[in-house]
Image: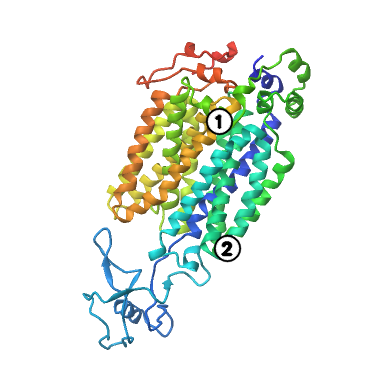
Amino acid sequence: MQIQNFFEYVGSTGYYHKQLYVLVGLSSIPNLLIAVHFVFTFYEPDFHCIPTMGWNFTLSENISEESFKYMLNTSIPLLQDATGNLKRSQCLMYNLTTPPLENESPIAPSPNTTDVIPCVNGYKYHFKDYQTSYLTEFDIVCDDSWKAPLAVSIFHVGMAVGSLCGCLADKFGRRPVILWTAMAQVVSMLLMSFSWNYIFFVCCIFVSGVASIMNYVPSFTLMAEMSGIEWRNFLSIGSWFTYSCGYIFAAGFAYFFQTWRWLLRVISIFSLLIYLPSFCLLPESARWLLTKGKRDEANKELMKIGALNNKLCDIQTMLKENPIEIDEEKSTGLWKSLKVMFRKEIRTRCLVACFSWFVACFAYFAIALYSSYFSQNLILNCLFSGLSDFPGLAMAYFLVKYIGRPRSILVSMLISGVSSFSLPFIPSDLHVWKTVAAMFGKLAVCGMFYIVYITTAEIAPTPQRATIMSFASTCGRIGGLTAPFLMYASKIQDVIPYAVMGILAVICGLLSVLYIPETKGVPIPDTVEEAAANKRFYGFSVFSRPDGKSIKTAVDPKQTETLL
């Protein structure tokens, strides 16, 4: 008897799955908050040097706007930016000895002089008095501006390390890894809010990155493993809808808590409240227990599922009469799991899936963290960025449901690629069209990210699923790691990052339809042989229906009628 048959007896939908849906869905919100807080903690407002004589450049009742501009013009030089426009320097100042008086010729060098020096008295940030960000408190600007993208990259390095450690979920189970990393997230964010220097801050960022991905991937895997064929797409995408709700929470928290330390503390406390029910109610994956040969624990979990779904049956007798053969040589260990991944039968599809993760993660974080095309207001920008995810996820759900996985990747990649590539070529005075293009790019990227997640989970066998997803996630984190530095290149030439995003997205979409098999309507594979037997490739016949007879996985006859 196949493992899938046990779940048909206890029900693939019911109260148990609703409870799991709520727990996994809610727990995905903190994972987004941990990733998106950089928008606010690393926000860089407009700023310039404080001159030697100590002007603070604050408009008050005693200083008129004309006097304010006069002082700026005689103290801060104008320089050409990357686009050739003159802009007041943020990091240089005239070397003044005495301050000029109003209505008097300034005792200062002429604008053409080279007698300028770096800021020696600190910086004046155009924040409101009650607002702070990590950059403004520790002056992470000008010569130290590289520290901001480095910190974001360290977060992605942490996620890459956490992805490599994802094999722990294959060894010790989904539940313990999810719960331990949840606590690590809460503690690291709380400690981050008390950081006193850059080194301690980035150490906390690294830990939060490790914990974030080690929490989310096993959670998504648990949801996919415990869902039935017909409901797998619906239940899996639910966790992504709640994940995107994190943008709304982030915008709300940032509106009410505009100091970066209190923002991180509120996020930490909120995450703790979200995770608390999971410590009592989150189940272990019965599918994982069965593939590991833990029959007694699997029996208890299956009986629990049947009881909550009102489908009681004698699971223990079924397990005795229909033993499941477990090949321990293939089911344990990081090295052996990676050897399975690089087997000839499934190597190419896994590598293409890894490349898809790289492109999806790079594009997602590049647009989510660095795009200002949605709104000039920081909080609204975060809110609109999150709201754009919902139509993208809805599009992904229906694409996956009606045209399958590989073709859905192709469609979402093409939309994302064209939108991203067009952004720098739209004139700056057509702000509405820039917003529309950015929204389409963002929703397509979000949908693409979900499709890549569920596709990778469905092509991997159960004993190695967490390890393969973790390896693919590591490739994604490399993309996330490069995103801040490539977006930093927009200061040199605005077209560079968006052109790279567009080209990579198109290449990835084409590779997906060529080398990733269709998994729509197929039971999730529990063995390497079942995974390798799926050879439903589209190739260049993108508009054709895949041949259902090519599926060599043992499937119930009634189920084969539902295949595409």
Could you tell me residue 229's position as x and y percent?
Answer: 58, 23
> Disc 2 on helix, strand or loop?
loop
Q: Which mark is residue 195?
A: 2
Local packing at callout 2 (Cα closer than 10 Å; few below 14, some 14-19, many 20+) is some
Snapshot quadrant of residue 321: top right
Q: Which residue is mark 1?
A: 335
Q: Is residue 275 visible?
A: yes
Disc 1 marks which amino acid?
Answer: Trp
Mark 2 or 1: in front is: 1
Could you tell me residue 238's position as x and y percent?
Answer: 57, 37
Question: Looking at the rendering, in which quadrant would you find the N terminus?
Answer: top right
Above or below, comparing residue 321 to residue 10 in the picture: above
What's the distance in space between the residues labelled 2 and 1, CA to CA? 38 Å
> Disc 1 on helix, strand or loop?
helix
Above or below, comparing residue 401 to residue 263 in the picture: above
Please tell me which residue is depicted at 74% across the width and 28% down the height of the picture.
301
Q: Nearer the viewer, residue 416 or 489?
A: 489
Q: Nearer the viewer, residue 65 or 281?
A: 281
Q: Is residue 233 visible?
A: no
